[in-house]
Amino acid sequence: MPNIKVFSGNSHPDLAKKICARLGINHANVVAQKFANGETNVEIRESVRGEDVYIVQSGCGEVNDNLMELLIMINACKIASAERVTAVIPVYPYSRQDKKDKSRAPISAKLVANMLSVAGADHIITMDLHASQIQGFFDIPVDNLYAEPAVVKWIKENIPEWKTAIVVSPDAGGAKRVTSIADRLNIDFALIHKERKKANEVASMVLVGDAKGKVAILIDDMADTCGTIVQAAQKLVEDGATKIYAILTHGIFSGEAIARINNSSFEAVVVTNTIPQDKNMMDCSKIQVIDVSMMFAEAVRRTHNGESVSYLFENVPY
């Protein structure tokens, strides 16, 4: 593919390599390291003049360092006369701070959008934004890819009893995502209503729907400390579900998450590789990974060739 360069930050080099392999191009040469005082230093080691540049950097791990690295890489490419710079951000950082939910709360997702635009990004490709309104925080085009087609494919291939299963949302916010998957599979759905006392702590749960004697598939866009999904699984067990799977787009797994999953009643906890999962898979045998690199690679290819990306909202490219 002429005139295309794919760079990668330090957050998820493996995903960038898979994207390049799928596109049949070489990974562009960049070195991002830190000075002794902790400042980020980026060297773009090949010409990008007139090129269509894609920078792959996920909002995981050391989120602030990775975000800063991305901004510096975008700016370095922009002032080196790149024709267009697209930020491929599988996990959008600060996506949970998307509204003023209490007085004096910052809307950090909007601040990140402003920073990306000011750095010089011309286009953003991301996956399963926590709130799809975040697309409206930008004045540049944003392609929000969905993991849904890959999730539906995984369910059909790996859960033998899927036709009689029930899809469950662990909170009211994910109801739309769950109803969409239930419609595609033509099965029932349920949701769990939770009452929070304070952030990251769940108080009581009520299941709306019937899971008795069924395989339950919990679906959410991200799992951080896993308190919600583990409690949701306990609730489903109490209500008579036979097996429980969890399918999450972004497996952040911070704090006690892995220990909680190991002690939980899940058959499997399935995440995509928008965040590196190698270490988590070694620590927890229940974690399985859906590869979504081909969706990003296809989005990059279609964007580069000026084709429509909407095919990817319904289908998994083979």
Image (tube, helix red, strand yellow):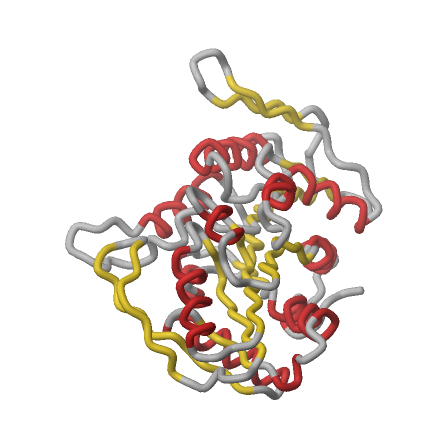
Residue 195: x %, y % from top left:
26, 68
Q: Relative to 90, is 110 on the left or the right?
A: left
Quarter where residue 130 is shown:
bottom left
- Most foreground residue, 111 or 267: 267
Please provide percent x and percent y for residue 27. 75, 36
In this picture, is 262 found above or below 189?
A: above
* Res. 279 visible in picture: yes
Q: Nearer the viewer, residue 85 or 284?
A: 284
Judge from the rendering whether residue 155 lies leftward or rightward of residue 166; answer left or right: right
Name the image quarter holding the C terminus: bottom right
- Give me the residue at 68% from left, 34% from top: 49
Q: Residue furthest top?
A: 36
Q: Is residue 240 left or right of residue 146?
A: left
Furthest residue in direction left, as rendered: 103
- Nearest the viewer among 282 and 250 is 282
Q: Is residue 243 above or below residue 199?
A: below
Residue at the spot 55% in from the left edge and 44% down from the top edge: 58
Q: Residue at x 50, y 38 (%)?
A: 61
From what the image shows, is residue 24 above or below residue 288?
above
Q: How many marks?
A: 0
Image location of residue 191, percent across then percent down: 42, 78
Q: Residue at x 61, y 39 (%)?
A: 279
Residue 84 in sight here: no
Q: Position of residue 248 (x, y in %)?
A: 54, 61
Between 181 and 279, the one lying in front of the other is 279
